[in-house]
Amino acid sequence: AVTVGVLALQGDVREHRAALEAAGATVREVRRPQELAEVDGLVIPGGESTTIHKLAVAFDLLEPLRERVRAGMPAYGSCAGMIMLADKILDPRSGQETIGGIDMIVRRNAFGRQNESFEAPVEIAGVEGGPVEGVFIRAPWVESTGADVEVLAVHDGHPVAVRQGRLLATAFHPELTGDHRVHRLFAAMVRAAAG
Ligand code: GLN
């Protein structure tokens, strides 16, 4: 059986853990390089990407995270996690870096003031059974993507779910909805990668 890690530095770790367990995965929280080495895939939760970046540096995890992603570990990021998986942030806060892996540029807090938080149905390619309820909380959108990035969902003309190989990212938070289809998709990606 595969073990799915949840990067547990900051953010909605507990909610991802519950969603993954509901999707049938064995879950482990990751705070140290040794724990990262022992998981088959990793979820990067929603929260605050600047804080996740700082803590990843402080916990000596940023380089190990980059190495595992480069080596093909499946990873799924929601919201701040999407930002962490982007190769590039538009106008990054000074010093803010990402893990990278998905050839895209993201715009933080993109949906603007009136719309900082909202819910909207989102149709995701590869997720059967109708739209998921997209919970957007100071969410990013994807500004542009490279040729190898598949756009799985669009809201208001902007990509909000993408996949590149074994990397998956959503601007919204399926972990907050009780609908586990996105986590089932990611768990299946982890099992497929483990062979
Ligand atoms: N705005 C946050 C950031 O830039 C993301 C918000 C979230 O994860 N809900 O990191």
Image (cartoon, helix red, strand yellow):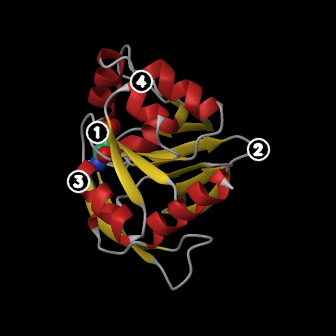
Write the residue at 39% across / 20% down: 96
Q: Quadrant of residue 73?
A: top right
Q: Position of residue 16 (x, y in %)?
A: 32, 56
Q: Secondary structure at mark 1?
A: loop
Q: Which residue is mark 2?
A: 147
Q: Which residue is mark 1?
A: 8
Is there a contact, CB below 8 Å, between mark 4 and mark 3? no
Write the residue at 35% across / 71% down: 22
Q: Position of residue 82 (x, y in %)?
A: 45, 44
Callout 2: CB less than 8 Å from ligand 1: no
Q: Amino acid at mark 3?
A: Arg
Which of disc 4 and disc 1 is earlier in sequence?
A: 1
Which of disc 1 and disc 3 is earlier in sequence?
A: 1
Q: Which residue is mark 3?
A: 14
Q: Is residue 186 visible?
A: yes
Callout 4: CB less than 8 Å from ligand 1: no
Circle 1 crowding by C-alpha within 10 Å: few under 14, some 14–19, many from 20: many
Q: The C terminus is located in which quarter?
A: bottom right
